[in-house]
Amino acid sequence: MKILQVNKLYYPHIGGIETVVQNIAEGLNDRTDMEVLVCQPKGKAISEVVNDVFVSRSGSMGTLFSMPISLSFISDFKKKAKKSDIVHIHMPFPLADLACIMSEYKGKVVVSWHSDVVKQKKLMLFYKPIMKRFLRRADKIIVATKGHIDGSEYLKPYRSKCEVIPYGLDIEDYEDIEDFRPILSDLLVSKQNKKVLFTGRLVYYKGVEVLINAFEKVIGCELFIVGRGSLETELQSRVEELGLSDKVHFMGNLSFEELKYAFADCDIFVLPSVANSEAFGIVQMEAMVYGKPVINTSLPTGVPHVSLDGQTGITVPPNDVLALAGAIQKLADDDDLRGKFGQNAYIRTREKFSMQKMLDDIYKLYEGLLGKNKRS
């Protein structure tokens, strides 16, 4: 079967959606005739083979509202879609919606819905009619959790088209740790303290300021913040203002191998997100694969469907400093509870979030669509 996967960008650009696209492309390349169509962040069009996957990058003048500005993408889409049995589009990507509608493509359309458009309210005034028409056109909509449907005002009318296929981890990649170093323990001011880890971009919706404010009330723990972003300087100033410099460590960006060390070395992982831009939180799975309990927030998205409250960790309301501090303290003080939640997290990751299961489920969805097409 000929599959055209469509997204804004592709490796070596790194992002959550880009990683999913790459995992599907490389994971199903031996079972399908797979091609990927994306845009350049800026620059002329190129075509290349990346890890045995054929990738076309349409020329772009740059980005506006986080979307590439590319007129050639629309014609590139039409040309490539014509040869495809299935076009698999990753949303949000308004230009792809428009290209699909304008191309009058007659084949099967699969959508991976990663998140609502949350921040660009003005853009939605123009984009919403296009998006609705495109979702009506789609044959199947893949979501990572049921929370993606329940928490989206846009998906509910198309619930019957939705299929839940959770994101997957290549668990063997995480189990393979060479020359392990306890990179968090090495930085501890007090070796008796529990190690609390956050990793992610330091941007508004991640809720790191809430986490820092909560840490003022936590005893016997040190916080390790991995990542960089626009709020980094502001967050560092807040740590100094609260007098937490001996309890909070900013580690910057880490390599994948170093991230594995950090996940394996922490006692508790926290994802304190405060806005619906956090649609899933793959980092939760990365901690859970090492048997770590997770504290997350009750956003109306997929976040609380990854680590489950009372089973693999604790879920608290977003933006609630006292509740977050209480959850951290509860886990820090109770070795048995941390062990129980961590063991449940370890099992859940392997049963629900394996890469092979995700790939098999997507392949079955492709087969089902083409099977119906042949019968009709």
Image: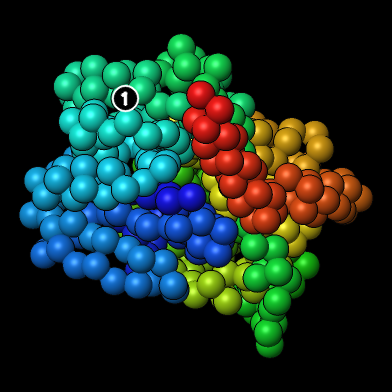
Mark 1: which amino acid?
Answer: Phe
> How many marks do you count on the picture?
1
Left or right of 129, for residue 242: right
Residue at left 32%, top 18%? 132
Left or right of 71, for residue 30: right
Left or right of 16, for residue 72: left
> Which residue was labeled with disc 1?
134
Left or right of 231, for residue 314: right
Q: 81 or 98: which is nearer to us?
A: 81
Query: Where does residue 23 sit, x and y in percent of width and height?
Result: 52, 59
Residue at left 41%, top 43%? 85
Q: Pick out the residue farthest to the right.
A: 336
Secondary structure of the residue carrying numbered label 1: helix
* Residue 45 falls in image quadrant: bottom left
Q: 260 or 45: which is nearer to us?
A: 45
The answer to whether 249 is drawn above or below residue 211 in the figure is below
Residue at left 12%, top 55%? 60
- Label 1 crowd (10 A; few <14 / some 14-19 / many >=20): some
Residue at left 45%, top 58%? 33
Chosen colour scheme: rainbow
Is residue 292 visible in the rendered structure shown here?
Answer: no
Query: Where does residue 161 sit, x and y in percent of width and height?
Result: 52, 22
Query: Where does residue 332 sit, x and y in percent of width and height?
Result: 77, 51
